């Protein structure tokens, strides 16, 4: 059974009337005075449903600087086979955990400057990642490009998909890509949904690219899927579209 652990990094209190999952345990005397909102609790539960293992959560604040202190929510994951299998691409689980938690928040978003993700492997190796709320807010908007892409593939609207392709940054033949998609799509079957694996932000030339990875769930054979887009743009353009067959 998945277990949720709660700890406190500093004496920051947040009010809540949310019910806890069966089997939840709290560690430390002060943690009895800390609770999380229903939305935050839903985010933690969604993460556990996806990754299994154990999740410790905490609220903290960094030391004061000239810009003031930063408030953050910490999610520490351990004993997860799913995460251990993705450590060669650690940006996937770290970004997805932060994003899944973030998208469950409502008014709580204003309580934090960033979401911290801590991953502990079965070898007890710890890796830490910081995701500013501003970055997650922008990522949520840009992930809609991936959802739109999958929707067009599902509806076999390949000409509209072709209009989204941009080969200026990385040269490729648009007609050839669309032709290959038309050829391989039938073998996978009907599309049921798109599930996000995670994302990463990289810089190529003068552009900040967002690489979005996920899996397309089908009624015959699922397939991994990724796109590269301009993170700072509002346009629905694809600099790369890949299938893992």
Image (tube, grey):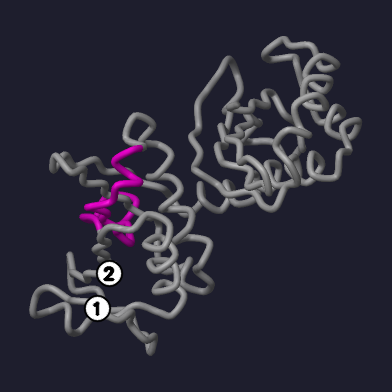
* First along the sequence among labels 1 and 2: 2
Question: Gap between marks 1 and 2, in whole Å?
Answer: 8 Å
Taking the view exactly as shown, the residue that stands out farthest to the left is: 29
Asked whether the residues under the numbered discs 1 and 2 touch, taking CB atoms below 8 Å apart as contact, a structural biologist would say yes
State whether residue 74 is above or below residue 196: below
x, y percent for residue 199: 51, 39
Say which of 114 and 32 sits in front: 32
x, y percent for residue 35: 29, 80
Would residue 94 appear left or right of 167 to someone viewing this image? left
Give the residue drawn at x 43%, y 57%: 50
Give the residue drawn at x 40%, y 79%: 37
Q: Give the magenta range.
A: 62-85
Label 2: few (<14), some or many (≥20) within 10 Å?
few
Locate the C terminus by quadrant. top right
x, y percent for residue 60: 25, 63
Q: Which residue is mark 2?
A: 1
State whether residue 9 is above or below residue 150: below
Q: Which residue is mark 1?
A: 23
């Amino acid at each position: 059974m998945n277990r949720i652990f709660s700890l406190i990094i500093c004496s920051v209190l947040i009010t809540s009337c949310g019910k806890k999952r069966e089997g939840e345990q709290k560690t430390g005397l002060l943690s009895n005075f800390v609770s999380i909102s229903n939305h935050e609790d839903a985010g933690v539960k969604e993460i556990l449903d996806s990754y299994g293992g154990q999740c410790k959560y905490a609220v903290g604040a960094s030391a004061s600087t000239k810009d003031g202190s930063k408030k953050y929510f910490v999610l520490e994951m351990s004993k997860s086979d799913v995460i251990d299998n993705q450590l060669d691409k650690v940006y996937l689980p770290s970004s997805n955990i932060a994003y899944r938690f973030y998208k469950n928040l409502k008014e709580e978003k204003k309580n934090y400057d960033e979401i911290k993700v801590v991953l502990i492997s079965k070898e007890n190796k710890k890796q830490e990642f910081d995701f500013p709320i501003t970055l997650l807010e922008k990522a949520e908007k840009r992930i809609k490009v991936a959802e739109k892409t999958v929707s067009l593939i599902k509806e076999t609207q390949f000409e509209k998909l072709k209009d989204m392709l941009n080969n200026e940054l990385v040269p490729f033949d648009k007609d050839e890509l669309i032709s290959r998609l038309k050829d391989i799509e039938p073998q996978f079957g009907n599309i049921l949904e798109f599930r996000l694996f995670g994302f990463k932000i990289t810089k190529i030339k003068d552009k900040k690219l967002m690489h979005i990875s996920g899996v397309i769930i089908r009624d015959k054979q699922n397939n991994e899927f990724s796109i590269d887009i301009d993170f700072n743009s509002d346009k629905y353009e694809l600099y790369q579209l890949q299938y893992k067959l």
